[in-house]
Amino acid sequence: MAETTQRSRTTDATGGPRLPKGFRSAELGWPELDRIPHPPRRLPLLGDVVGVDRHRPIQDSMRFARALGPIFRRRIFNKEIVMVWGAGPAADLADESRFAKHVGLGVANLRPIAGDGLFTAYDHEPNWQLAHDVLVPGFSRDAMEGYHGMMLAVAGRLTDHWDRELAAGRTVNVPGDMTKLTLETIARTGFGHDFGSFERDRPHPFVTAMIGTLSYAQRLNAVPGPLAPLLPRGAARRNAADMAFLNRTVDRLVEERRGSGGGEGDLLDRMLDTEHPSTGERLSAPNVRRQVITFLVAGHETTSGALSFALYYLARHPDIAEKARAEVDGVWGDTGRPGYEQVAKLRYVRRVLDESLRLWPTAPAFAREAREDTVLAGDHPLLRGAWALVLTPMLHRDPAVWGDDAETFDPDRFTPQAVRTRPPHTFKPFGTGLRACIGRQFALHEATLVLALLLRRYDLHADPAYRLTVTERLTLIPEDFRLRLSRRTAPGRPVEEDSAPEREDGGSPGSGCPAHAGEGA
């Protein structure tokens, strides 16, 4: 109860600091807040809204970070936000004995749909620990090895699609296709469900609804709490309809599983049937729905962005792509269906992925709050409950850690020696501590596997006129990024057809896709 009381004292309903009339900085939990720099031209009531790009708040904050330093603050109407990106303060915030996850800003705005799911739960809510302990075994080595074949099968559907686009002389929509891939992967491996994404000309309605809820949650960040009900009614109605669709889709998925008598021990089986190893508790029906939504959204949205950025950089750096491709050939040899263990041996491909996540971590920020009164970086007193937002793309660009060429794409930043000599807590694409992403090993295995399969099969040709534009919808993804493909040729001969993954159903890569579910599931 004390923790809830503290949150109420220092924050508003969305997790943003409460700024009552005549507020003192100590009421925010930062007694010396006035020492922290903020953008110029701050206006009464409006705060730092002059020149703000409300569609790209992360990139906007990166611009201010470069000017204001490793700890700065911004006020959007009545929400004062302290942002941190320096390696020292960020390492301090990663100390689990002093700081915990803070649910605020856009994450809190997702609670109407995700509730006390793993990503959006407050630390004091008991269902977080219950769900975490029940679901952690679903990401063990044995479980991951079981998912590997399904990941290959979905990747086969992607290469079928790309082969058709190539044969028709069309470029491929990288973010759109990576979203299809990662949605199908988490749906099949976690819930035994097929959305039929690759058989659709348009995104599945689940994806459309998901993007709608994420975009609406981000939009609320820039609106004073009391004015949120004054947003255009159409936007609120669309958001309500999007949430209702997500709920209906997941409810139908769970009902199908209950009616079938169980699956093959996947995440949904664990949610429905597994008791907590110590207490014997099970997840309630409402919490199961919230966890399924959390995994379907978070389990594909961030990974699709990571793959899209990696493919962008590989296309822009053909020398790096060729080095990665040579590693895939050397490790996989003539096999048409790489085994689980072979993916872990692709160390250079993994470096490419890590470097892409360094420059554009698709979950671009995480918030931390003080467990007790403390001092941040030896210089900034904080009261219990005070919080700060770690701006991950800037943490990953700190020149004191990454050098003066921190904006340059260089996978060799992740050689074993470089990793060993780098200060801890300076690479955080999956958050930090106990509340870091539970599915990070799943995402890394999937992304490494897919990058390797695509490099082995295709040459990637960048459009010289394309300039990277990053779309923000709480997560980051390249905007309007397309690639031209050609089937790869090895020295002196075409690559054999079996260089693509075999289909799980035993068919060849071009033999078509399995039947898929209807429009609403």
Image: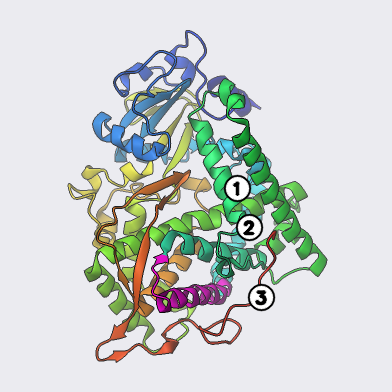
* Residue appearing at x 28%, y 79% in the figure: 326
Circle 3 or circle 2, nearest the eye: 3
Q: Position of residue 513 (x, y in %)?
A: 59, 78
In contact (CB < 8 Å): disc 1 and disc 2: yes
The image quadrant that residue 521 belongs to is bottom right
As helix, strand or loop, the secondary structure at mark 3 comes to loop
In the image, which is nearer the foreground, mark 1 or mark 2?
A: 1
Assign the N terminus to one quadrant of the image: top right
User: Are the residues at dot 3 and dot 2 in contact (C-beta closer than 8 Å)?
Assistant: no
Question: Which residue position holds label 3?
Answer: 515
Q: Amino acid at mark 3?
A: Ala
Residue 116 makes an appearance in the image? no
Element under label 1?
loop
Mark 3 crowd level (few <14, some 14–19, many ≥20, 10 Å Cα):
few
Secondary-structure class at tag 2: helix
- Residue at 25% over, 35% down: 66
**Residue 31 percent across, percent down from the top left:** 41, 17
Residue at point 55%, 65% (across, down): 201
146 shown above or below 43: below
Q: Is residue 101 magenta?
A: no
How many residues crowd mark 1 within 10 Å: few (<14), some (14–19), many (20+)?
many
Q: Nearer the viewer, residue 278 or 473?
A: 473
Q: CA distance from mark 3 to mark 1?
A: 32 Å
Disc sitting over residue 135 in the figure: 2
Quadrant of res 397: top left
Identify residue type, mark 2.
Answer: Leu
> Which label sits on residue 118?
1
Residue range of the region highlighted in magenta in the rendering: 146-172
| Looking at the image, residue 369 lies above or below residue 437 | above
Residue 354's quadrant in the figure?
bottom left
Q: Earlier in the sequence, mark 3 or mark 1?
A: 1
> Distance between the Cα atoms at labels 1 and 2?
10 Å
